[in-house]
Image (cartoon, rainbow, N blue to C red):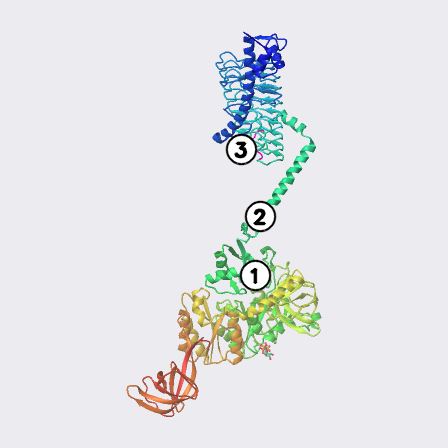
Amino acid sequence: MSIRVHELAKELNFSSKEIISRLLALGTDVKNHLSTVDEKDADRLRGQMKGKEINLDHSERKNSEDIKQNSSETVQEGRTPETRHGTEGRPQGSRVGTDGRTSTPRSVSQGQPQGSRPSAQTNQGPRPNTPGPSQGARTGAQGPRPGYQGQPSGPRPGYQGQSQGPRPGYQGQPQGPRPGYQGQSQGPRPGYQGQPQGPRPGYQGQSQGPRPGYQGQSQGPRPGYQGQSQGPRPGYQGQSQGPRPGYQGQSQGPRPGYQGQSQGPRPGYQGQSQGPRPGYQGQSQGPRPGYQGQSQGPRPGYQGQSQGPRPGYQGQSQGSRPSPARAGAGVPQAPAIAEQVKRQTPATKKAQDKAYERKREMEKERENALRAPHKRFQKQPKKEVKDTSPKHIVIQESISVQDLALKMSRKAGELIKHLMNLGVMATINQELDSETATILANEMGVTVEIKAEKSLAVIEEIEDDPKDLAFRPPVVTVMGHVDHGKTSLLDAIRTTNVTSSEAGGITQHIGAYQVEIKGQKITFLDTPGHEAFTAMRARGAQVTDIAVLVVAADDGVMPQTVEAINHAKAAEVPIIVAINKIDKENATPERVKQELTEYGLVVEEWGGDTIAVPVSAKSKVNIEQLLEMILLVAEVRELKANPNRPAAGTVIEAELDKGKGPIATVLVSKGTLNVGDVAVAGCAFGKIRAMLDDKGRRVKKAGPAMPVEIQGLSEVPEAGEPFSVVADEKLARQITSARTAVRKVEESKRTVGKVSLEDLFDKIKEGEIKELNIIIKADVQGSVEALRQSLVRLSTDEVRVNPIHGGVGAINENDIMLASASNAIIIGFNVRADSNMKATADLEGVDLRFYRVIYDAIEDVKAAMTGLLDPTFKEVVLGRAEVRQVFKVPKAGTVAGCLVTEGKILRSAKVRVIRDSIVIHEGEMESLRRFKDDVKEVLESFECGIGIEKYNDLKEGDIIEAFTLEEEKRTL
Ligand SMILES: Nc1nc2c(ncn2[C@@H]2O[C@H](COP(=O)(O)OP(=O)(O)OP(=O)(O)O)[C@@H](O)[C@H]2O)c(=O)[nH]1
């Protein structure tokens, strides 16, 4: 059976011309519409034309199905529509409009491959062992490869490129290049098991399908895609979704080594997108719908999770960068990137950047505007305050609350609060002792170091190297009883060594002088008596090396002789006895020696160690022998000093000279004093303008033990004050101002540390007192001795009672100075001290005690030593009442009706009854009433009733004196 062309055209609803051309293409020889076509050829054409219709329908349906399928897959499998890598599902090849190459699935595919369509130049049909339906091999197209079991669709009509069909082993349903495809398409590769979809209609670029080893689902470029798309590369095993409809840019799929999930550009994307790079193994989400910019996916070496630009994004996005620390760093980028960069014109890039920045700014502004109204209500994130307060501070012995707060970088209020918790109520200016400050600071987490600041007032002692020390002259003080010849002896000594040339020049008297004997010098303090000696000792200055005790051979040991002995002993100064006036006829030196033994001074010839030299000041007998003895003692004492250092010494005397200003005689004890030196003496300081020696001669320097008068001090220092040479006047000024500041404090503390019977026990307990020094003054010597012996017997293992001086007569200033210098108490037996002496004793902090019974004195000292000293009580008279009437009250006894004449009568007071100025009774009050009421007190001019406990012998006219006993310090 045959059919004419026009009938066939009518049947198939095509033009005759179309049918003719198609028939010709099928190899049927037709010339015009009247030509006949046998049934076989007609069927072929019918099949073809119907196939086209079906194919076209199918293609369209497929597209919509793809979209549906993709979206459903997205929901079901959590996949989003983009180019994926590492997939094991269906790969979709290039879509309509593809112009390039597409790699179709290879062997192991088991799907339904669609072979190349008409117009395909190279098409290989289904391979052997392909069990599924195949639409035959087209010209130039390679069909499904051996092992293919699916239904491959060959290259589609309009296909002009090279298409490689599914490779052997392919089992999926590959769709080959679609109509309009003009590029090269490579079908699924061997090992592929998914469903790749080839390039779709409209695709004109180059598309590389899944590579060998690919096992996932890959969706190729979608309709509308006109760029270059590189599909998943070898090694890819994930899911990859290719560019979506509307995509017109360049898309590079996942690179070799990629094993994660990658979502390619979304619909609406028109930019350039570079997929994950080699080495990438994580999950990468490409640009989202609405994205129109440039997107560069994760870079080589990236192994993490990367999310590309989100919907609405239109700018340029650079994905994760390679990190040198990450795997794959340094892996070169595919040439596609360079190509892509080349294609991107600077103008486009700039425009895109600007657009992106503008959009970002607008978004920021909008966000800020939205946030702004709520800003003030928003809780500001609490700023973490870095604690910069110190954890360790250094304080001195006391510090005010304010200063401590400053040091701790805390608020004073905070400290006060802590102090309150510690039970200390303090104000901001309150001084805290170091102990309290330490506890407080520790409580607040701060450690404290107490560093007593070196007071400028005290000049530090310079320790001399023993090898620098050299012998120095001894300093001698002459002491003795009145008129025993002290002054005469000093004069004799001075004149003994004065040469004739010097004789006329001896006009100067500076309080001290030096003599030279046998090439050795001796310094004498030219102040007879012990006033200066003790005064200087009381100030802590010990300048005397040797004491010369002058005892008149015709008078013997006298009270002041004893005083002198005791002073010297207290100062631990060796004594040389000068038995004077031996020229006198009634001189009895042996008796003097005898008497001295009573005071512990045994002369050498009697087996003792006291040197006694019989002299005559008047006749200048044995003066040199005395001096030699002094040198001998000095030699034994090895008196040495370093002459090569800044000078230091003691002020011997000082006065204000009308012409010279303040002048002071100083005794250099160490170092060498030079004119021009800056010296500090007590609170005075100044540059030494001039120096005079003991003979009034100007000198430029003064070595150890040399007395000199200095000029240039700012004020007159006190005798006994130390002096020192300092570096400069600035330092000198600082030192003296510091000394002036502490002087008041020292004066107020002057009595502190002095012993008294009240605190004797405490001081003994603290180990502060090992020896109780006592000065005994009595009306007669017998009492002195009796007391001395009784007190010495009170000595215990802990403390020794040491009567350092005993004498007859009133307590004088010397006694007080000695007590002050020796930290002694003074016991006066049947003697008194005048008010001046009491004041001096108070000033010096010396405890004065007066007794009329020896037993009381001994008991007091004993009690003080054992801590059992009873407090003394002072009677305080409160008032007086005169008895006006006496009542006999049954059960209550006698009650006196009284008028308070003086002061007041207290119920709690003690009372005494005085009749005719004689105290007839002392006792307790039993009752005090006003009318019928008991009262606590009755004031002057009021009447009251007074009952006395256990005393009823009251008479009119008696005086009832009310008094109390108040405890007081026992100072008298
Ligand atoms: N015969 C004699 N008389 C002397 C001697 N020494 C001193 N005198 C005399 O004793 C008297 C007192 O001498 P001073 O030197 O004043 O005695 P003093 O100890 O300094 O006296 P005060 O300063 O009052 O303590 C004077 O009249 C001296 O002349 C001496 O060696 N022989």
Q: Any magenta on residue 381? A: no
Looking at the image, tell me whether mark 2 or mark 3 is earlier in sequence order: 3
In the image, 955 versus 360, the foreground residue is: 360
The numbered dot on residue 305 is 3
The numbered dot on residue 371 is 2
Q: Quadrant of ligand 1?
A: bottom right
- Element type where label 3 sits in the image: loop
132 versus 531 height, above or below: above
Determine which residue is flagged by label 1: 638
- Which region shows up in magenta? 300-309
In the image, 777 versus 16, the foreground residue is: 16
- Element type where label 1 sits in the image: loop
Q: CA distance from mark 2 to mark 3?
A: 31 Å
Q: CA distance from mark 1 to mark 3?
A: 95 Å
Q: Any magenta on residue 306? A: yes
Q: Position of residue 131 (x, y in %)?
A: 48, 14
Which image quadrant: the N terminus? top right
User: Residue flagged by tag 1: what amino acid is it?
Assistant: Glu
Looking at the image, tell me whether mark 1 or mark 3 is earlier in sequence order: 3
Disc 1 within 8 angstroms of ligand 1 (CB)? no
Q: Nearer the viewer, mark 1 or mark 2?
A: 2
Q: Position of residue 398 (x, y in %)?
A: 53, 62
Q: CA distance from mark 1 to mark 2?
A: 94 Å
Looking at the image, tell me whether mark 1 or mark 2 is earlier in sequence order: 2
311 versus 337 height, above or below: below
* 786 left or right of 113 in image: left
Q: Residues within 10 Å of mark 3 (few under 14, many from 20)?
A: some
359 versus 644 height, above or below: above
User: Residue flagged by tag 2: what amino acid is it?
Assistant: Arg
